[in-house]
Image: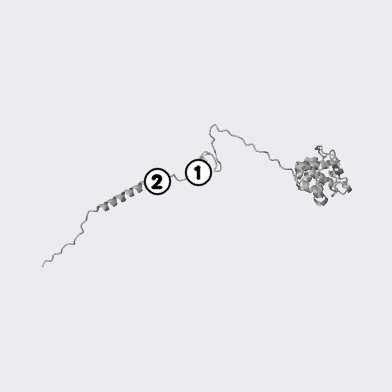
Amino acid sequence: MNSYHQPPLRPVARPASRRARLTRRILAVAAGAAALALASLTAIAPPPPPSQDELLAASSASGSTASEQVFDLPAGFAQSSITRDSVAAVPGVQGLAQGRTNRDWAELVLLLGDFPRTDDNITVMMRWMRQENGPDDWWNRNNPLNNGWGSGGNSGLGSYDNLVIAAENAAEALRSNPGYSAIVAGFSSSAPTAQIEQAIWASPWATSHYANGSHWSYTPVPVIESPAGTW
């Protein structure tokens, strides 16, 4: 008895639906657009920066070292110089000693006394020196203010080894004696000359008190150098 085997049924391919075909078409178009965009980005991307070896090679070829920077100015560009205000150094003890004048000594006392070296303060100090020794021999006994502090002489008639030591002692006397506090206050605040001078007259610096100012001279004090060896 012959047996009959029926072959298995194969699925029959059905044509894709309209919606499926449309979806595939959209995906294909999107993929193409993405590929085109990627290609465009690659085309406009900036080149990579030069390597260190390339920079060194370019520098050597131009004759410049790595630390040099060469700038080419455009034609017609004019160079201009810059003028700066000069800065004058404020003289210290050594600089004032080299000046050797009565003005230098007046400034030295103010410097060592920690007083401002203003024009008014210097003017008062130089007038004071003139009242004590006169302008022509202001360095007398290396004691321009006839200061008895540390000079070894009574009534300010002692002397110092040099004018720098004399300035040190004059500044110390002003700062140490409470009877000179009004003078110190005047110099410290750069008070008007009249105020400082009145404080000098009222102080015990001179027993005559400069006749309460009647012996005080206001004419300009000439600037005069002291002899060699006084500083």
Position of residue 119 relative to residue 20, above or below, is above
Residue 189 percent location from the top left of the image: 75, 46
Residue 209, quarter of picture:
top right
Q: Amino acid at mark 2?
A: Leu
Residue in the image at 78% along x and 48% along y: 185
Q: Is residue 114 left or right of residue 58?
A: right
Circle 2 residue: 41
Image quarter where the N terminus lies is bottom left
Q: Nearer the viewer, mark 2 or mark 1?
A: 2
Marks 1 and 2: in contact by CB < 8 Å? no
Tell which circle, 2 or 1, labels the residue nearer the N-terminal end: 2
Quick one: 215 or 175, which is closer to the camera?
Answer: 215
* Label 1 residue SS: helix
Q: Is residue 177 visible?
A: no
Using the numbered discs, state the Cα–Cα distance from disc 2 to disc 1 in whole angstroms: 27 Å
Q: Residues within 10 Å of mark 1 (few under 14, many from 20)?
A: few
Circle 1 residue: 55
Image quarter where the C terminus lies is top right
Quick one: 207 or 117, which is closer to the camera?
Answer: 207
On residue 66, which mark appears? none
Q: Is residue 149 left or right of residue 88?
A: right
Q: Amino acid at mark 1?
A: Leu
Residue 211, quarter of picture:
top right
Q: Is residue 212 visible?
A: yes
